[in-house]
Amino acid sequence: MHNTQRPLRWRPGIYAALALALLALYPQVKLQLTRGHEGHGAYAFFSQDEIAYSAYVNALIDGRPRRNDPYTGRDDAPDAQQPESLFSIQFAPAYALAIPARALGLSASTMFMALTPLMAFASALALFWLIGMATGDERIAAAGALVVLCLWTALFALDTTYTYEYFPFLRRYVPAIPFPFFFVFCALVWRALNAQTNRAGWMMVGLASVVFALLVFSYFYLWTAAAAWLACLAVLWLIARRGDGKTAIKIFAALGVLAIAVLLPYFALLSHRAPTMDTVQLLANSHAPDFTRASIRLGLIVCALLAYAARRKRIEWRDRTVLLTASFALTPLVVFNQQIITGLSLQPVHYDLFIAKYLAWLSLVLTLALLWQGRDRTPKRVPGRALACIVALALGWGMIETVVETKKHEWINLARDEALPVARRLRELARSSSSSSTLRSPDNQSVVLYFNLDDGDISPIIAPQPVLWAPHTPAFSGVTSEENRERLYQYLYYTGEDLTKIDERAFDSLDYRKRYLIQALIDWGNNSPAWTVNWKQITPEDVRATLNSYARYAASFSRAQATHPTLSYVVTEGDADFHNLDRWYERDAGEPFGRFTLYRVRIRQ
C-alpha cells in the first residue's frame, strides 16, 4: 500500500484558493459598483442571521461585555447579571473579529467584507491540505477542494425539503471562521495516525485538541460533527487495523480525554443559558430516525462503492485512506440520527447546510481518487484535460450560483445600504450624549422604534441604541418570551398595524409581512418542517386566538405600556401612521435621511 510522506507542493492549492476567493468577492464588488459614490459601506449578505452576528461583533468592538444583547441594550453587570446566549457561548469567532477591529479602528461591516474572501481562501486551502495528504496528489487535491466547495448545491436534486443559502460555508461569522478549522482538525488527526515518530504523533494530537477547542466555542454543528467523524474513524480504524491497535487506541483515547476536558467548561456555560434559549433554538424531543437527507444517501452510495471495489480487489479495504473516506461518508448518517440515542434534536437542517453535504462530497472525491490510483495506491497522473474540465465545471457552477444569488438578493442589499446613514446618525447622537468619545459606555437606554422591521434589524450593526423590536430580538438572552411578545405588541400598536380584520381562514394567502408577524406571535419556527422535527401546522384557531389577544392588548394600552420601555427615537420611511404613537409621545420636526426620517420623541406629560 502506498502512503506518501512526500511534502505537498502548495502552488496548485493556492491557485484554487485564490480562484474561490475571487469568486467570493463578486457580491461585494457588485454592490459597491451598483451604489457607486452613493454607497454607505454595507456588506453584501445572503443570510438574515448574519445581521445578528454582526450586531454582536459591533457590541464587542464598542467594548461591551461577552454577555450583551445589542437588541435590548442589556449588558452583563455585577448588579444585573445576564444569562448565557447562543452568541456568548460561541464567542471565539466574534472575538477573532472584534479584537483586531478595535485595534485597527475598523467597523463590524468592514470586517465582514474582508471575512468572505479570506475564509473562502482558507477553506479551499484546508481542504487541499487534507485531500493532498490522503491521496498524495496535489492536482487531485486542488480540483477536489473546488468540487467540494462549489458543487454543494448539486445535492439539492436529491433532497425532499429545499432549504438553500448561497455558499453556506461562507455565512459570517459562523460557520465561515471555524469551517476551515474543521478540516484542519481532520488533517491533524490523520497526521497523528500516520506520524513516523511518537513525538510527531503526540504533537499532532495536541494541536488537534486545540483546534477542537476552537470548534467547541465557535459553532455547535461543527464541533458535534467533528466528534461524530472522530468516533466513526476510531471504530473503523480499530476494526480494520488491529496491527496499529495499541498506538491508535492511545491516540484516540488521548483525543477523547482532551475533548472531554474542553467540553466541561462549555457545558458549564450552557448550564447558565437563558431560559428562552431552548425554545428560540427549537430544541425538540425526538427519537425518530432520519434517513431522508441527500448527504446520507450519497454517503451510503460511497460506502457501497468502496465495498464493491474492495470485493473486486480494486482497493484494499484496510488501507488508511479507504478508512478515512468511509468515515467521512458515514458521518452524515450519525449526525442526523444521534437523536435515536440522545432523544434531542436541534434544527438538523444546519447540519445539512453547513457540514454534512460537504463531507458527502469529500468522501466521493476521495473514493474516485482511490479507484483511479488502484489497489497498490501508485500515483497516476490524471490527464490535464480531465482535471481542467472538472475545475471548469466546479468554478462555472460556483459562478452561476454566485451571479444568480447576487441578483436575487440585490434589492435587499441596496435597501440596507440606503438605511445605514440613519444608523450612523444614531451612533453620532450616542457619542455626543456620552462622556466617552470612543463609546466604551454605549447608549443602551435610548430605545429606537423603526417602523420598518428590516431597518430595525440592521440598526445594531452600527448604532449602540437598542430597538423596540426586530426579528432578531428573541435570538439573544435579554428578553423572556413574555417580554418579546409584549414588545412585538407595542410595535404593532405604535405603527398602526391592523391585524384585527384578517380572516383566519385566509392565513396562507396573506402577504409575507402579515404572515411573518402572526407567525412570530404564535411561535416562530415551530410551524416549519425544515426547522424542527416536532413542527406544528398553524390552524385558523391559532390565528384567531392570536389576533384576539393582540386586539385586547391594543384596546387596553396605557401609559404603563408606553413607558416600558420609553422611546427616544422613531425612524420612518415614506408616509407613516402616527395616530397611536402621538397619543403618548411628542415628536420633533424630524431629520431627513433620503427616504428616511429620524424623529426624537419624548413621553407626553
Image (cartoon, helix red, strand yellow):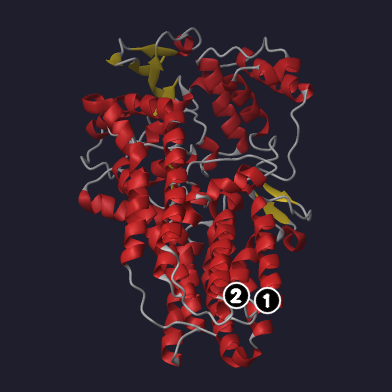
Looking at the picture, how far across and down is residue 486, in whole percent?
A: 58, 28
Closer to the camera in the image, 288 or 318: 318
Residue at screen point 73% across, 61% down: 342
The residue to which callout 2 is attached is 322
Comparing 140 with 513, the one in front is 140
Q: Picture quarter containing residue 518?
A: top right
Q: Nearer the viewer, mark 2 or mark 1?
A: 1
Q: Residue at x 41, y 37 (%)?
A: 45
Q: Residue 420 appears at what percent x and percent y?
A: 32, 28
Rendered view: 358 above or below 239 = above
251 relative position to 78: left or right: right
Contact, mark 2 vs mark 1 (Cβ under 8 Å) = yes
Q: How would you rate the neighbour count of disc 2 (Cα within 10 Å): few for under 14, some for 14-19, many for 20 or more?
A: many
Image quarter of the N terminus: bottom right
Query: Vertical placement of 12 versus 191: above or below?
Result: above
Horizontal side of residue 303 vs 188, given as left or right? right
Q: Position of residue 86 (x, y in %)?
A: 52, 50
